[in-house]
């Protein structure tokens, strides 16, 4: 029997969308896990918005960050943040419009709060989420100073960090969807 391609597609789509007949009450229970409590959720709710909402209490300075970087970050990013073997973190100013852009903290990242968020959640690579808020602020301070964005005597904390204007802040397109809230 010959069926048109569109008929086959409609039949396949109908089978895919057909309810299975198993209600939520009939789903098997395996006796593992438990519902997440509010305190469980709070421990994992560590994201930070571009405007600084979610930044923890703490503070850090450039000299403190230099020590932490040497001890925890230089193995992957080099002593000055330019040598690697992993991503280059320093330099690249003015290179984004060239044929060989260098995407670093100072040339590419639009918000310093994103930098803190990433460092605090994911670094160091061999021990993510092991840094204290103070260490996160200190590392951000050192990296911003290395990129010529803040002076050596700057102190980073939940109040000062969101005020730092990154060189590429206007290099991205805002999300125009009306249903996407800005925090």
Image (cartoon, rainbow, N blue to C red):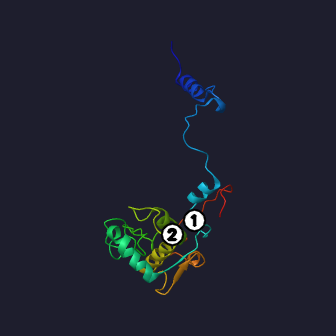
Tags 1 and 2 touching, CB below 8 Å: yes
Q: Secondary structure at mark 1?
A: loop
> Which is more N-terminal, label 2 or label 1?
1
Disc 2 crowd rating (10 Å Cα; few below 14, some 14-19, many 20+) is many
Quick check: 153 left or right of 66?
right
What distance separates the C-alpha of mark 1 from that of mark 2?
Answer: 8 Å
Image height of 6 relative to 108, above or below: above
- Note whether residue 20 is visible: yes
- Note whether residue 147 is visible: no
Q: Toward the viewer: 162 or 122?
A: 122
Quick check: 72 left or right of 48?
left
Q: Residue 113 appears in which quarter of the rendering?
A: bottom right
Q: Position of residue 56 (x, y in %)?
A: 58, 70
Residue that numbered label 1 is attached to = 48
Q: Secondary structure at mark 2?
A: helix
Tell me the tag on residue 116: 2
Q: Position of residue 39 (x, y in %)?
A: 62, 57
At horizontal 58% and vertical 79% (from top left) the residue drawn is 160
Q: Residue furthest bottom?
A: 153
Q: Toward the viewer: 62 or 5?
A: 62
Q: Residue furthest right?
A: 178
Image height of 64 relative to 13, above or below: below
Q: Residue 54 appears in which quarter of the rendering?
A: bottom right
At horizontal 54% and vertical 65% (from top left) the residue drawn is 172
Q: Residue 26 appears in which quarter of the rendering?
A: top right
At horizontal 40% and vertical 79% (from top left) the residue drawn is 66
Image height of 154 relative to 22, above or below: below
Q: How many marks?
A: 2
Tell me the tag on residue 70: none
Q: Toward the viewer: 73 or 144?
A: 73
Quick check: 43 left or right of 153?
right
Q: Residue furthest front?
A: 31
């Amino acid at each position: 029997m010959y069926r048109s391609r569109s008929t086959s597609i409609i039949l396949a789509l109908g089978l895919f969308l057909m309810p299975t007949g198993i209600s939520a009450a009939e789903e098997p229970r395996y006796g593992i896990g438990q519902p997440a409590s509010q305190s469980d959720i709070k421990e994992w709710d560590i994201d930070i918005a571009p405007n600084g909402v979610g930044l923890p209490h703490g503070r850090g300075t450039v000299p403190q960050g230099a020590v932490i970087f040497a001890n925890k970050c230089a193995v992957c990013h080099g002593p000055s943040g330019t040598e690697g073997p992993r991503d280059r973190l320093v330099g690249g100013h003015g290179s984004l419009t060239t044929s060989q852009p260098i995407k670093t903290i100072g040339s590419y990242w639009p918000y310093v709060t994103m930098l803190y968020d990433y460092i605090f959640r994911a670094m160091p690579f061999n021990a993510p989420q092991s840094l204290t808020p103070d260490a996160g602020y200190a590392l951000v301070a050192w990296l911003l100073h290395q990129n010529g964005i803040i002076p050596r005597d700057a102190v980073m904390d939940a109040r000062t960090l969101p005020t730092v204007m990154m060189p590429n802040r206007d290099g991205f397109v805002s999300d125009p969807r009306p249903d996407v809230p800005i925090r």
